[in-house]
Amino acid sequence: MILRLPVFWSRLIALHLVCLCLPWTKAAALPAASESVPLQWTEVAAGVWKATAGSEESLTLLGAAGQPPKLSALAAMSAAPFPFAGKGVVAQRVGSRMVLRFPLGREESVYGLGVDFKGLRRNGTTFQLHVDHWGGRAGRTHAPVPFYVSTQGYGVLIDSARYISYHVGIGVRLDASDKPAAVDRTTQGNDWTDLPRSDAVEASLIGPGAAIYVFAGPTPLDAVRRYNLFCGGGALPPKWGLGYLARTPLAYSAQQVLGDVDEFRRRGIPLDMVGLEPGWHDKAYPCSFEWDGKRFPNPGGFLAEMKRRHVRVNLWFNPYVAPASPLHTKLAPYAASHLVWNGIVPDYSLPEARAIFAEHLRSRVLSADPSMLMGFKVDEVDGGDQWLWPDHALFPSGNDGEQMRQVYGLLVQRILHEHFRAQNRRSYGQVRGTNAGASPFPFVIYNDNYDFSEYITAVANSSFAGVLWSPEVRGGSGLDMLRRTQAVCFSPLALFNGWETSKKLWSDEKYLGAMGDAIALRLRLLPYWYSAFAEYSQKGTPVIRAMPLVPGFRATLPPGKRGQVDLHTNPYANVKLEEVKDQYLVGDALLVAPIASNVTSRKVSLPPGRWYDFYTGKCVGENQVIEVTPPLDQIPLFVRDGGIIPLIPAREWMVEENEIVPLEIRHYGEKPGEYLLYDDDGVTFDHEKGAYSWTKLSASRGPDGSWKGEVATPQKGLPWHYSATTWRFMSAPVARP
């Protein structure tokens, strides 16, 4: 009898018999194909070394930004050795991936890898750095900068326009020289961890390779400074850019904008900039880049009225060109394979496309009044995936969608920055997505996240990434709007975004006075802010400094773990170091501790040295944690011992070009103090030709114990826009100003 099986079962049995004959054990044991890639390190600038793993692609992050390093400023820094001498950085080709491995010591912490909203310290985490809306996914953010800085005093940048995956102190290798011993969870539960600590930072990307840059210290702050200088130095906004910005609702008309400005002036609330949202275009999403004839029938006349009110104008756009726009025909030969909102996506990695776009802005948009249209808000260059082009999209340059996703925000910023530089007028604006190399660009990142604690964390995190980031105020209850207003006034860009809310700053009269005070203080602190930005521009020192960048400040173990865990004897314990991510320094002397509306008090971690209350001059402690309960009209602010804070009188708009104003200088504490005050004309790039001054302010006690302040004589022929100088010594409790 012959058993006849259905064809399906016959074939399945035959396949099974064949599979039994395959050498499964041997095949499963074979590792993925890999080969070692040699690295040759060359010092390309003072304290900066470069090696290339494999071969660089033609499009890189620093190449897209296109800004020259500040070599003389780097050379002026103190010498420091190559940080990995004798330790070894390893590169391997594993299939289609280039894998890079950097040593990570037991006591070493890593910060950076982009603007994250959850935390600062990166140890024990994995990231895929990918330009995107923030949605809570590690690494997918508005500024996924592939630069990290170590507490050992060095920084590392992988200059690739690819998505880069990082394993930071996690993923123990079989061949690791310093790996944890196996621990039995049942008998050694206190020592067991589900994330044993690796001795490396590992990064990988798909592609032929990438350049690696290593930045020496000797301190973490020095490493960040070198990185910023190598990218071209930090942005220096015009003085008016450090005032207050209000963005209008979606489709406001010229008359409605002027009405809001008049209301600011009537109520005495400072205002320097108004941001026009999509309605200034005659078509948006995608954009026409043409003034709307109904809402703005006479752009020149509108801008003349804004000039009379001392308010500059910022224009919103996303860079996708509408079919009906005159730009469409000109840029069509440079369009990518995919559309965004049915608009073409120009390939701005090509200089021809950049020139066409810049010329259209000059002749069709900014020509209405170049002196008043002094900035742009660049939207929708971050994601998400469902809106932008796919990774397999093709661009005329030969770059693919993944690469262009990582650099598109950089490319648009570059066009705008170079346009304003050609006009010798500084700009200040906003951008939704950026990357490494952006530090010289006068743009502040923003997003839709509205969690108070997360956006304060992002402000702190930006200091490791060579970018500027500010939260936004978007309506809300009166108290909530107040606390958010106070916070944004101590970030790189102070603004209210009214694009989809009916709320105004004056919607709740109960809190209006305190909000006006916060904005007024922002303007009063112009000399301090401006000098901090000049340090960023000329020396690479970030304006905002997260606590790990503050000398002597150290994270600690949580209270419940102290005495139970010793990182020296058990470096693999899964214990998170206590993070201080809700406060930061502005400049060198001013500690800012924003407070949310749902609490009445908060803890502040004071760095080493004595610290004094900004408002009263009272000593609040040193190198300790204090608790403060500020009144509603104050954001907690503290000044280090010997700190000098220069201010100008209260006013309703920022100082104009070459305007001369009185100067108040405050000294805090019991130590003598020195401060370098920066000045230039406030609006042009003439400072790059030497038209600027640094003037020393100093405070010391005389033989009789009384304080004396001195202002060095400004150098003749250099800018100095201050008249009468008043000193105020805040070493004893005094009444608030």
Image (cartoon, grey):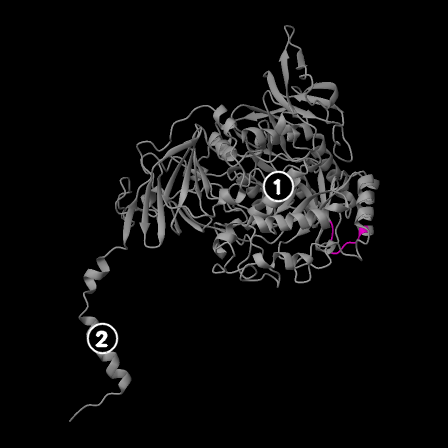
**How far across and down, in percent of the image, does residue 341 sit?**
61, 62
Hey, which residue is sitting farthest bottom in the picture?
1
**Residue 418: mark:** 1
Residue at image x 83%, y 39%? 308
First along the sequence among labels 2 and 1 = 2
Question: In the rendered image, is residue 250 in sight?
Answer: no
- The magenta stretch spans residue 25: no
Q: CA distance from mark 2 to mark 1?
A: 66 Å
15 left or right of 731 in image: left
The quadrant of the image that shows the N terminus is bottom left
- The answer to which quarter of the image holds residue 712 is top right
Between 160 and 443, the one nearer to me in the picture: 160
Q: Main secondary structure of the magenta part?
A: loop
Closer to the eye: label 2 or 1:
1
**How far across and down, in percent of the image, does residue 179 sit?**
28, 42
- The answer to which quarter of the image holds residue 543 is top right
For mark 1, give the secondary structure: helix
396 left or right of 699 in image: left
**How far across and down, in percent of the image, does residue 247 sit?**
72, 48
**Residue 428: mark:** none
Residue at image x 76%, y 48%? 504
Vertical arrangement, residue 158 with respect to residue 254, above or below: above
* Amino acid on which disc 2 is placed: His
The quadrant of the image that shows the C terminus is top right
Magenta span of residues: 248-254
Hey, which residue is sitting farthest left in the picture?
1
**How far across and down, in percent of the image, does residue 725 sit?**
73, 19
Residue beneath disc 2: 16
Residue at image x 78%, y 45%? 506
Give the class, few, some or many, for how many residues have Cα within 10 Å of label 1's Cα (few <14, many ≥20).
Answer: few
Between 148 and 631, the one nearer to me in the picture: 148
